[in-house]
Amino acid sequence: MRISRAMRIALVGVLVLGVAVFILLIELGVNAGLIHHGVSVQGINLGGMTAANAGKLLEKEGDTLKKTLVVFGRDGLPRKLSFEPRTIGWQPRWKRTLRAAMAVGRDQGPFDALVERARAWFGIEVPWAGSPKPEEVDRLLTEWEEIAEASGLTIDRGALRYKIRRVLSYRPRQSLYRVPLTGD
């Protein structure tokens, strides 16, 4: 029996569609009620965890992050400049971060959710929710600018503000971050 070209194309199409549906069902079953494999928060792998377990881990890690000293330095400064994130009002919002991690592959339309689920298998990084209080960052920057100016250096305030916001959620933290100066 000879199968026509059109029939072969149709059979291949049905086969591909069937395999795609099968993979989707397996994927939905594997990650049902769990954070998708491949989802992490600043290097903390949450993939395959329940919301309760991931929440405990994020709460613990967030508590450590907000108390871990952040140190900046630069040749020419009389000393290292440091602060604890909680002193500038930064609190890692672990509940909001957990919601964002759980939402991967769930909050979009069917096609977008499928694409995001596939991407998650190759790794999706969810950022920590939370930001420092601007007035506390301003206070810290003013204090550091006075120290730098006494040594004849001028801090690039905008660049340092940006850098502070970025390094707050780094894990593990570097032992020293470079203070940006004007003219760098």
Image (tube, rainbow, N blue to C red):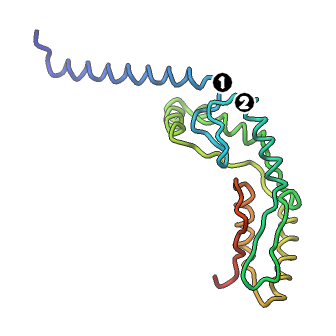
* Residue at (89, 60) in percent of width and height: 87
Query: Is 106 located above or below residue 94 in the figure?
Result: above
- Determine the secondary structure under disc 2: helix
Contact between marks 2 and 1 (CB within 8 A): the answer is yes
Left or right: 35, with 132 as reference point = left
- In the image shown, does 12 or 69 lie closer to the viewer? 69
- Determine the secondary structure under disc 1: loop
Left or right: 51, with 145 as reference point = left
Quarter holding residue 44: top right
* Residue at (78, 83) in percent of width and height: 77
Label 1 belongs to which residue? 33
Residue 12 placement (x, y as % from top left): 27, 22
Q: Amino acid at mark 1?
A: Gly
- In the image shown, does 83 or 113 lie closer to the viewer? 83
Label 2 belongs to which residue? 51
Residue 175 placement (x, y as % from top left): 73, 65
Mark 1, other Cα within 10 Å: few <14 / some 14–19 / many ≥20: few
* Residue at (38, 22) in percent of width and height: 19
Q: How many marks?
A: 2
